[in-house]
Image (cartoon, rainbow, N blue to C red):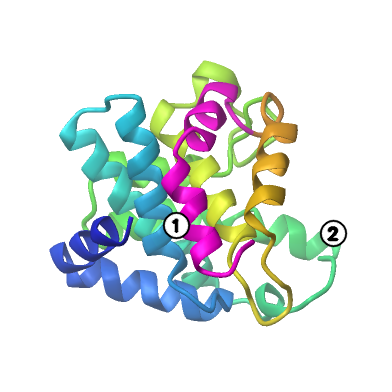
Amino acid sequence: MQSIVANDQQSDPKLTDLSTRMDAIEGYTRPHGARVAAIADEIAAVFNLAVHDRLVLRQAALVHDIGEVVMDRSYLKENRILTAEEYIDMQRHPVIGEQQCAKEGLTRGVQLLVRWHHEWWNGGGYPDGLEGEQIPLAARILRAADTFSAITGERPFRKAIAAPDAKRYLIEWAGIEFDPRVIKALISIDKLFEAELAAGGA
């Protein structure tokens, strides 16, 4: 997984810079965007996605929360439940991210994956309430990879979830938040969980 992260970072300094800025705003103690890109690429390989589609997915993963950079809200770093107003405000970030990706000259494919990375398998996500196969496979992969990286990554206001607990969480939410096939693929990639254990996520 480390080699995938390194290759992505070296391929486009602009995307790496944007990803680093996102990590700082969100308070991740290790690179979140790069981890999401690496995890998503591992899952995409299980599904035999085309080389170009995997590239678009990795690029989208690196900048998936670019909307949060643009919004720059203080509540993103606070250890508390969001107010109703803040939650509604936060749900704007995928659309703002889509727009910012366009301004950055990223492809339409990247823009749409950024827009749809919070869509849920059961239709309960945002911003468009897509469900099931309406959500492109790459976006479903990005949703799962983002969640796995987020919950196993430590932030100033919360501890990381241990790798076995993260696996259980993903399985419990398969068919609700996540495409069950994507979760089956993710949990079949032993080296992802071995990497978390090696990093201290036992």
Q: Residue at x 47, y 71 (%)?
A: 70
The magenta span reads: 178-202
Going by the image, does 175 lie left or right of 3? right
Quadrant of the frame with the C terminus: bottom right
Residue underneath mark 2: 84
Please tell me which of labels 1 and 2 falls first in the chain. 2
Toward the viewer: 168 or 116? 168
Toward the viewer: 23 or 193? 193
> What is the secondary structure assignment of the residue under circle 1?
helix
Residue 48, x across and y down, in percent: 27, 25
Going by the image, does 89 lie left or right of 183? right
Residue 197 lies in the magenta stretch: yes
> What is the secondary structure assignment of the residue under circle 2?
helix
Mark 1–mark 2 Cα distance, whole angstroms, equals 21 Å
* Amino acid under disc 1: Gly
Residue underneath mark 1: 97
Residue 24 lies in the magenta stretch: no
